[in-house]
Image (spheres, rainbow, N blue to C red):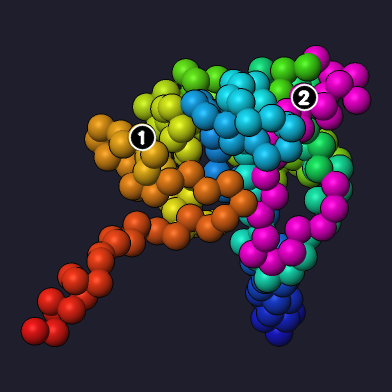
Amino acid sequence: MKTMRFAVVLVVLCLAIFQGSVRAQVVLNELMPDPASDWSPTDGNEEYGSLEDEWIEIFNAGSEAVDVTGWRLRDAVSDSSWRFGFSGVLGPGEFFVVYGNEAYQWEDENGYAKNGLSMNNTGDTITLVSADHVTVVDTVAYTSQDIGDDRSWGRVPDGSPNWECNDGLNPANPPGSGLPPTPGEPNLGAPVETVDWGQIKALFR
């Protein structure tokens, strides 16, 4: 009888942990390590800058809001190489995009070396860490083959375990997802083929 009660308690505990992880699941969702055009809407200019226009997107794939205040980003250089600190609440299905110029400003204000997001074009590892600055929330590694000028590395669809090169602006060989990079917007899966009105009418002749 005691064994059965213990088993029931264990199952309930596991279900609670699983449900909690489903409700509150914030992930790294899309990265732009090698920008070749002006991506940042917050840098106050319309010019491309390798430091300013890199970006990292996080996404709440769960069903509950998550307070991300104190969470931080780092790259593979060292545990102390913090690139950005978050604040605020991320609702279910919401995105948060950090641009290189914002990371540079955060580093400057918090006494860290001013490198922006510092994502290497030859490959890197990006890690999202919780407010205790120890617990890893999510991490992703990419190689030079995964990216390129104005190609992002992202989950397709959002929050899924499937990562693809979003090469809609600069086709890759071999081909990637065919999607354009979408900071702050959904990665919608297979691109929609555009047709004109004449093609639509021809279907009904």
Three-letter code for the amino acid on which mark 1 is drawn: Asn
Residue 161 in magenta stretch: no
- As drawn, the label of residue 14 is none
Residue found 48% across the figure and 50% down from its top: 155
Q: Residue furthest front?
A: 198
Where is residue 52, by image quadrant? top right
Residue 61 in sight in this render: yes
Residue placed most toward the observer, 102 or 158: 102
**Is 102 colored magenta in this rendering?**
yes
**C-alpha span from label 2 to label 1:** 27 Å
The numbered disc on residue 104 is 2
Judge whether 187 appears above or below 171 on screen: below
Residue 119 seen in the current view: no
Label 1: which secondary element: loop
Looking at the rendering, which quadrant does residue 67 occupy?
bottom right
Are the residues tagged 2 and 1 within 8 Å (C-beta)?
Answer: no
Classify the position of the N terminus by image quarter.
Answer: bottom right
Q: What residue sits 55% from the left and 20% below the top?
A: 120
In the rendering, at what x and y percent does residue 183 appear?
Answer: 58, 46
Q: Nearer the viewer, residue 132 or 13?
A: 132
Residue identifier under label 1: 170
Please report the bounds of the magenta region as a residue range: 87-113
Q: Position of residue 53 (x, y in %)?
A: 62, 29
In the displayed structure image, the side of residue 118 where residue 109 appears, left or right: right
Looking at the image, residue 186 sits to the left or right of residue 42; the answer is left
Q: How many marks on residues?
A: 2
